Amino acid sequence: MGRAPCCDKANVKKGPWSPEEDAKLKAYIEENGTGGNWIALPQKVGLKRCGKSCRLRWLNYLRPNIKHGGFSEEEDNIICSLYINIGSRWSIIAAQLPGRTDNDIKNYWNTSLKKKLMSKQQKEEQARRASWFTVKQEMKRETEDYTVPPYWPQQQPPLMPLTSTSTAIPHSMNSPHPFGFSYVQAHLYENSFSVLSSASSISPINNTYSQVSAPNDTFQGLDGFPGELIYSNNQQIFDGLEGFYGTDSLPVGSSTGSSSAESSSWGDIYSLGFPQIVSGFEACQQSTPQVSTYDEQHCTWAA
DNA sequence: AACAACGTCAACCGCATGCCA
DNA sequence: ATGGCATGCGGTTGACGTTGT
């Protein structure tokens, strides 16, 4: 059985509101309030509109102190920070911005802010790559001038994990750092596994970012280690951490291949604005090759 | 000038949630 | 405890304006 329609669709006007309709609705609500019943309101006002439509028109356009357009830099920062932490919870984001509606913020994000952030991120990434290239060139030059004595131990290439998984966990709003999140990365090796975690804090006010890394804990042996969790579903391994962080786990990438709607939508935002966090995920988001060789020149593993 | 492509934003739709009888 | 209903929310659509060819 389907739900009964909220209004008689045949006798209801749709589409843009006329100034007369706006005036009627505004005058009535300012005089009498909504009466706590939007469904009955159109009849009282004398409008051939659905109650839902009236509500939307009032909340998004007619009610007092509504701001349209002209988002400030500060508002941009707040929207970005909150989006990163809580996702597309537009009503919650709107609650932090007096005079802004969820619809307005949603439109602004989808049409402008997302792109703005993307281009900013691209520029930063280019700058980062350019400076890293300079550092590597410098290191290479220094190494060439230096002869390694025969007894000097050669640096071992980093271990290639069999599989890796990572997640970002937004802090709860009542935590000391409500606009931050924690990042946990797990690597499974042949005879051990390691868990690396870090906490990040973003200030929506001045757009600053800080990160604190915890020691990299390596556990020898795999006895008792729930490896199947990593192999089967990267969400599961972090479910147990929820109690610790007090929030929902948020998978962002896994070498075992997560493709949930949640992780893909968050994947977008991670690739947008915060390279410090994204850089750590990149390795995890690649498929783990079966046979790998270490490229000493580029300090990377290759299939 | 005409048309296409693109951007913006108001409004709609359908689902989830909460309240109340 | 349950079902019906109103409300709130987020995703999507489509009209309209602007810009580019």
Image (cartoon, coloured by chain):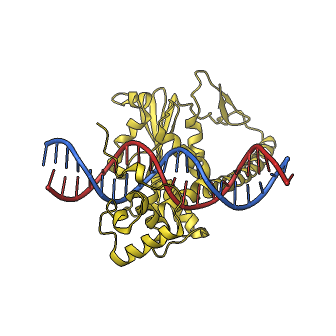
Chain colours: A yellow, B red, C blue
Q: Which quadrant does the N terminus of chain A fall into?
A: top left
Residue pictured at 50% horizontal, 72% vertical: A66
The one nearer the camera, A224 or A239, is: A239
Residue A178, can we see it? no
A208 left or right, relative to A237: right
Residue positioned 44% across, 35% down in the render: A234
Identify whether A57 is placed above or below A197: below
Q: Nearer the viewer, residue A115 or A23?
A: A23
Furthest residue toward top: A291
Give the quarter of the image for residue A145: top right
The picture places residue A194, in percent across and down from the top left corner, at 46, 38
- Where residue A180 appears, x then y in whole percent? 47, 58
Q: Quadrant of residue B13?
A: top left
Q: State which quadrant residue A289 falls in.
A: top right
Question: x, y percentage for residue A206?
Answer: 56, 69
Give the camera-side residue of A212 and A115. A115
Q: Quadrant of the C terminus of chain A?
A: top right
Give the residue displayed 73% in from the left and 53% down from the top.
Answer: A127
Please state if A134 lies on the left or on the right of C9 as rendered.
right
Total residue callouts:
0
| Residue under the image location 45 percent in, 67 percent down | A96
Residue A230 sits above or below residue B16 on the image: above
Q: Nearer the viewer, residue A272 or C13?
A: C13
Is residue A80 in view from this perspective?
Answer: yes
Q: Position of residue A236 (x, y in %)?
A: 38, 36
